[in-house]
Amino acid sequence: MNSIGENCTELKKKYDTCFNQWFSERFLKGDADDSVCAPLFRVYQQCVKDAMKAQQIEFKEIESDYLGSEKEQKVPPKSGGSS
């Protein structure tokens, strides 16, 4: 899958490769230290943020913490139809 910005796609592929290698060769063997891919992630993350700005996409929503918050715990409305 390509990234949101064309110029970010190659960075995404490099990060994905690093992550997949870390996951299979380290994490699944008990090593949870994911710092090996952190530099690639930071560069890719900044590229995505820049692409979002260029496309006038607000990213304050994606920077909010939802886990454990009221927003995460809110029950979605039921869809129409009878049960």
Image (cartoon, helix red, strand yellow):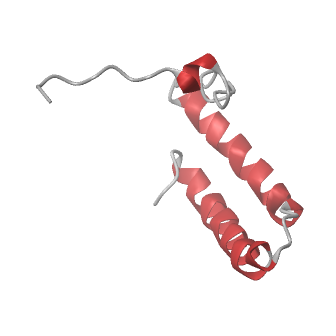
Q: Quadrant of residue 71?
A: top right
Q: Position of residue 25 (x, y in %)?
A: 76, 82
Q: Which residue is drawn at 86% across and 72% down?
A: 31
Q: Residue at x 75, y 54 (%)?
A: 41
Vertical side of 78 occupied by 43: above or below: below
Task: Residue 69: tell me if it is visible.
Answer: yes
The residue nearer to you, when weighing 42 against 27, is: 27
Q: Residue 26, image x and y in percent?
A: 80, 77
Q: Is residue 80 left or right of residue 24?
A: left
- What percent of the width, then of the height, locates residue 81? 11, 25
In the image, residue 50 above or below residue 21: above
Q: In this view, does 16 lie to the left or right of 40?
A: left
Residue drawn at x 15%, y 30% as measured from the top left:
83
| Lateral position of residue 82 relative to residue 79, left or right | left
Name the one closer to the observer, 77 or 63: 77
- Which quadrant would residue 35 be assigned to in this image? bottom right
Query: Does residue 58 appear anywhere in the picture?
Result: no
Residue positioned 69% across, 63% down in the render = 15
- Using the image as rendered, state which of residue 51 and residue 70 is in the foreground: 70
As drawn, 42 above or below 74 = below
**Who is closer to the viewer here, 77 or 19?**
77
